[in-house]
Structures are given as structure tokens and as C-alpha cells.
Image (cartoon, rainbow, N blue to C red):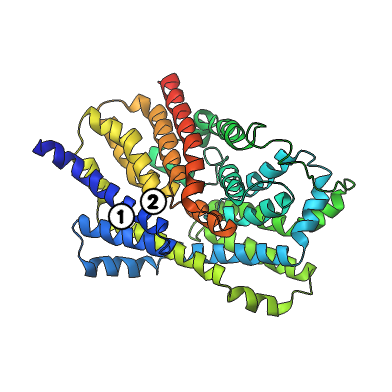
Amino acid sequence: MDSLFVTLAPFLKVLFSFLLMLAGMRLRIGLGLSILVGGVVMGLLFGMGLLPIATTGALALTQEKFLFLAAIVGLILILSDAMERSGQSRRLMEALSGFLTSPRLRLVFFPALIGLLPMPGGAVFSAPMIKTVSEDMHITNSDRAVLNYWFRHVWELVWPLYPGIILTLALANLQIIDLISYTWPGTPLMLLTGWFFFLRPGVLGAKDLAVPMPVTTRSKSAALREGLPLLIAIVGAIGLETSIAAFARSIPFEFGVVAALASAVVCVMVQNTQLGLNFLRQVLTKRSLWSMISVITAIFIFKDILQAAGVVQEMARVAGGEAALFASAAFLPFLVGMVAGINVAFVGATFPLLLGVLHSLGMQDQTVPYIVLATFCGFTGVMISPIHICFILTCEYFQCDLGRTWRKVVPPCLVFLASGVALFFLYV
């Protein structure tokens, strides 16, 4: 009995901290504060003192990754606000309406498009587009949030510019084609699962989608003109990120995303001269902007406390043999993904352990199938996580109840997880 408690103790500590965060969100003490309290409690439960926790939190806010992320989210909000306030978002919808005749396709297209831009919190970029394209449809803000959140991530397992994939390739010493040739079913599975739970006629009926956008002539030039800021943001970010990775590896790849977004903001300001510099002053003092920055701050502090406290290492230490293989390939990626809410966290924290266990058991020839299993489990944890930054920012944008919206995400996540497990048994 004592040995069982010792084995379960690290997992129970994580669960308690996680439930504490959920309780804080439920009691509406603030998303950032809830995450911060959960992180501090987790650090204390795993033996950290208050001073080391405070030091870890302070150092987290000096990290290059945090500063870049804050800049990226800030620029996203400025760009989306500028396009919305100037009417350019609406003009873009109207220009594309001739090409996107299906209301359901309109709801999927923009989150999926922005999903090609690998940036943390990118769902807040497509949220204003979902709002614009669906404002005459009879759907709730909670439905808008889950549609934006789900379809924003359909490329996560196959798009080679995502940091999680890049880190997986580096850790497992794999070629991109070797990994994607196994993970590619993730995208059609995400699309089909999202359609079944959020878009099929039994969920969104004809009456819900009965008011279509006015159909205009198919003007490619108008669509290009109104969509130019988005093209600059997406193509520029991908191009700069790829160029930096190929020719200037000493430069952080996030610099390319920041440069592209800044260029997109300049573009929309030039296209809509009525905005003026006064617009920038107004948006920089908006409460919503600083609210989201505070959430990002809390997530980074939480992430670093998780690492400094050795949470994952402690969970791995109490497992051994086949239990270690199961823990490192399925349970730990799911748990770390759910607790941290980002792909890089479960990849960086658990894949070295998984690869070490496979090596110790002489199962190196099964590396790819187990990596696929861990990827599906970890990604499901990320998607089901209430502290996933895209989920939080989307709910914040649409001002919808986080708990009620989260419950809508759970069933498709479980179906997606079951599909990943089935793929694993097909591959081994």
C-alpha cells in the first residue's frame, strides 16, 4: 500500500495543482492568477521553496521566448484590431464570399488558413475573422470559440514549421518525411472529427446558417488587396522562418514571425490611413491586450516552475519496466501536454525519456510507431488542456464561459486520441 502511494504521489500532486487552477478559473479569480497559483502550489508540493519559486518566475520573464511571444501576441491583436476597426476584415469576407459559397466552409477556412502560421496564440488571429463571417449566423459565442480553436490546429502534426515537429526530428534523429509519412492521418482525422462534433447538420442546422454573406463577383484583385496584410503575415513569417533556419541559425526563428507581423501592421495602416497613430495609442492601452499578456506571463512562469521542480522527472522515476514504456509513450506526454498546454513541453520533457526506455529495452526498431503514439497522446493533452493558450485567448476574445466551452472540446479530443492509438497498433 505504501509503495502504491509513493508511486502515485507525484501524479496526485500534479492533479491537485491542476484542479486548483480549474477551481480558480471557475471562481473567476482571473485566468492568469489561477494559472500562477496552480504553478506556485505545484512548486511547493514538489519541494521548492518560495524564494526559488519567485526566482524561477522572475527569470522566466527575462527569457527570449517569453519576450518574443508577448511581442507576437501583441502584434496579432494590433493587426486584428486594425483590420476590424477599419472594416478591412469585412471587406475581405465580402471579397472571398464568391469563392467560399458554403457557410460551413467559411467557418473552417480562416482558422485553418491561420493554422499554417506557426505562432503561439495564433487562434486569436483568426477569432475576429470567425466573428465577422458568422455574425449573421445563429450560433453561440461558445460554438464560435470551439470552431476557431479546433480548426486552427488541424495542421499541427504535419506542418514541418511547427516547433514541436522540429524538436521531435532533432531528438529522434529522423528525417521529416519519415515522421510525416506516419503522422499525416492526423490532419484528416482532425477535420473529420471537427465536422462531426461541430459542423454536421445535426449540430448546426440549415436555420443556424440560414443567413449567408452577400455574394459578390469573384474578384481576385479585391481579395488580394484586402487580404494583403494576412498574406504578408503568413507568407512572410513562413519565408523568414525558413530562411533563418537555413542561413542564420543563430537568429531566433520567432524574429521572422515578429518582423512579418510588424510589416503586416504597417501594411494595414498604409491601406487605411484614417486609422492614424492615434489608433496605436488606443490599442496599446486596451485592457484586453494587457489581460492576454498577463495570461502569457502566468503560463511561462508555470512552465518554468514545472521544469525547475522536476515534476516530469519525478513522475518518470517512480515508474519502471513496461510501466515506464507506457508512461513515457502515452501517459506522460498526455499529462504534460494537458498541464503545460503546448507541444514543445511534452516533446522536450518526455521524448528523451521515451527514447531512452526504447533503447534500454532493445526496441529501437519501434521508435517511429512509439513516437507517433506519444505525439497523438501529447497533442490530445494539449488540445484538451484548459490552459492551452489558444483556447484561453479564444474564450477571452469571445467572452464565453471557459468551463462550458471546454466540455465541448473533450469528446472530439477523446475520439482523436482513440484514432491515434488505433494507428499505433496498425504501425507496430
Going 56% across and 43% down the picture, which residue do you hit?
150
Point out residue 143 in the picture as x, y percentages from the top left corner.
60, 46
Residue under label 1: 306
Mark number for residue 340? 2
**Vertical arrangement, residue 399 with respect to residue 196, above or below:** below
Alpha carbon of mark 2 to alpha carbon of mark 1: how far? 8 Å
How busy is the neighbourhood of tag 2: few (under 14 within 10 Å), some, or many (20 plus)? Answer: many
Looking at this view, is 373 or 394 the one in front?
A: 394
Left or right of 97, for residue 366:
left
**Callout 1: helix, strand or loop?**
helix
Q: Amino acid at mark 2?
A: Ala
Residue 104, percent from left and from top: 70, 39
Disc 1 marks a residue whose amino acid type is Leu
Residue 419 in view, yes or no:
yes
Helix, strand or loop at label 2? It is: helix
Q: Position of residue 132 (x, y in %)?
A: 72, 54
Image-quadrant location for residue 25: bottom left
| On screen, residue 382 above or below 273 | above
- Going 63% across and 54% down the picture, which residue do you hit? 127
Looking at the picture, tell me which residue is in the foreground, 236 or 27: 27
Neighbours of disc 1 within 10 Å: few (<14), some (14-19), many (20+): many
| Quadrant the C terminus occupies | top left
On screen, residue 344 versus residue 311, left or right, reads right
The reply to whether the C-beta atoms of the residues labelled 2 and 1 are less than 8 Å apart is yes
- Which disc, if any, is residue 7? none
> Which of the two labelled residues, at mark 2 and mark 1, occupies the earlier sequence position?
1
Q: Is residue 243 left or right of residue 166?
A: right
- Percent x, y of residue 265: 68, 66
